[in-house]
């Protein structure tokens, strides 16, 4: 989609099936539906405005209200969302700052076992400004290059969406792909081929833009007050 | 060794030399992060439980488990003695391992015993056994509602809830997995 933005499309979206082999749990299914959209001339905070409007609109359409109940929590979907940085959330709930001393293994474990469970469940939460090592496709924050302009949305404990101010610098993008591939190889994971078409689109000039991916099945779970994807998917595996 | 992706509810694993079973399992994967396998685990010897999270690259010890069909012979103090009909070896299983199952052992009964490093860990009995009621209050006449239960004692002292119509001398079938009354086999 960023290639389309580079080609001059200013506001684009798609909704389609995604596939992740071997991922199965209450919140994971090997096939799921993702909604993505991109805006040129925008950053991750503009995408946040879009996201608030989208969620409020969908809730109003299907539930007739933006005050919903999810798994025993009363949640008001408008207008104030809880914005917190990754750094603050980790200092508060896990006792360390991943922006200062980054450790990917510890980050993933503590995020899942300490930080996510402690996030408020009665208000939408935006966890923002990830350590740059965790945002291979996002732009570094100008005021603080140790973090990148990425946020994740949690509502009622469900991780719903991931947004970036997109990285537009082809040289930095190539360097990050190389570093990322080396890390994957070191961890014994499959190495993805370099996306030359994407890199040459960046070289030809990608305007400032931002984009988001939102898990549609999980949004359905939220609005249907379902505890598991199994309750909202028509065809399931495993 | 198991990989983290082998983990699932009911799988028996080994942690720090102790046999454990996964009682609850959840696959999670934070956005763009690595897969994390969150488990609730029960120690099969001590019954203590713990929460543990594994990353996908981690390896988990496979317990050395062996299952044998044995014949129940006799009770010896707090132990119960079984015989391996292939080797004629006598094997002692403590009442701690058996718990309530000790009430359902019948001489010459074939049972399946699971060993962890040659230590008896779990006994699987036939699903049903028959026992004679030796003591119970007579049911009130006319009170035949099927869901009304009363206590009854069987011949080895085990107490079970039975329907009102069951009397002393009756033989009943007991489900050894739950310890509950299943049906009446014959009237005394």
Image (cartoon, coloured by chain):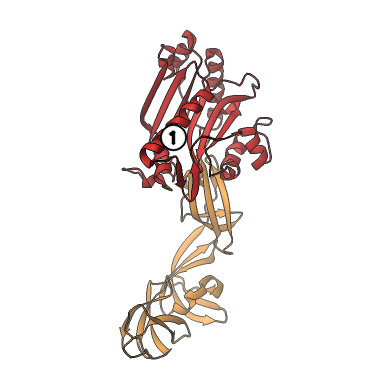
Chain colours: A red, B orange
Q: Is residue A13 above or below residue B36?
A: above
Of residues B166 and A14, the one nearer the viewer is A14
Residue A137 in sight here: no
Q: Is residue A128 above or below residue A11?
A: below
**Residue A223 percent location from the top left of the image:** 41, 42
Label 1 packing within 10 angstroms: few (<14), some (14-19), many (20+): some
Q: Is residue A193 left or right of residue A172?
A: left
Of residues A79 and A99, the one nearer the viewer is A79
The quarter of the rendered structure image containing the N terminus of chain A is top left
Q: Is residue A144 left or right of residue A163?
A: right
Q: Is residue A98 left or right of residue A69?
A: right
Disc 1 chain ID:
A
Residue on which the image places disc 1? A56
Query: What residue do we see at 52% from left, 77% from top?
Result: B80
**Residue A95 percent location from the top left of the image:** 68, 41
Q: Is residue B54 above or below residue A46?
A: below
């Amino acid at each position: 989609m960023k290639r389309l933005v580079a080609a001059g499309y200013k506001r684009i979206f798609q909704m389609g099936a995604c596939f992740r082999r071997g991922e199965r749990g209450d919140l994971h299914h090997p096939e799921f539906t993702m909604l993505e959209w991109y805006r040129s001339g925008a950053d991750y905070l503009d995408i946040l405005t879009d996201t608030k409007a989208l969620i409020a609109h969908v809730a109003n359409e299907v539930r007739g209200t933006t005050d919903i109940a999810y798994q025993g929590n009363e949640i008001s979907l408008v207008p104030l969302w809880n914005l917190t940085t990754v750094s603050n959330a980790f200092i508060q709930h896990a006792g360390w700052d991943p922006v200062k001393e980054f450790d990917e293994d510890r980050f993933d474990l503590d995020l899942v076992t300490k930080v996510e469970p402690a996030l408020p469940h009665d208000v939408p939460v935006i966890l923002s400004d990830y350590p740059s090592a965790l945002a291979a496709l996002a732009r570094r924050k100008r005021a603080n290059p140790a973090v990148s302009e990425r946020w994740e949305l949690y509502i009622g404990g469900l991780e719903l969406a991931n947004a970036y101010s997109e990285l537009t610098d082809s040289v930095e993008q190539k360097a990050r792909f190389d570093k990322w591939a080396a890390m994957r190889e070191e961890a014994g994971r499959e190495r993805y081929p370099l996306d030359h078409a994407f890199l040459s689109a960046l070289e030809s000039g990608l305007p400032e833009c931002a984009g988001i991916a939102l898990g549609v099945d999980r949004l359905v779970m939220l609005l249907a007050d379902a505890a598991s994807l199994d309750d909202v998917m028509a065809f399931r595996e495993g | 060794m198991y990989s983290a992706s082998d983990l699932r509810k009911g799988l028996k694993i080994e942690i720090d030399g102790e046999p454990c079973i996964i009682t609850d399992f959840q696959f999670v994967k934070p956005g763009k992060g690595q897969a994390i396998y969150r488990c609730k685990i029960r120690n099969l010897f001590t019954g203590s439980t713990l929460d543990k999270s594994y990353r996908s690259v981690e390896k988990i010890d496979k317990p050395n488990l062996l299952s044998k069909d044995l014949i129940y012979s006799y009770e010896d103090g707090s132990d119960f003695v079984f015989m391996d009909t292939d080797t004629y070896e006598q094997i002692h299983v403590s009442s701690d391992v058996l718990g309530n199952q000790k009430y359902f052992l019948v001489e010459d009964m074939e049972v399946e015993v699971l060993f962890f490093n040659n230590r008896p860990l779990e006994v699987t009995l036939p699903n049903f056994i028959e026992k004679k009621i030796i003591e119970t209050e007579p049911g009130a006449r006319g009170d035949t509602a099927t869901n009304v239960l009363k206590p009854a004692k069987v011949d080895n002292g085990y107490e079970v809830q039975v329907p009102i119509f069951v009397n002393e001398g009756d033989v009943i079938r007991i489900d050894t997995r739950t310890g509950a009354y299943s049906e009446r086999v014959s009237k005394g």
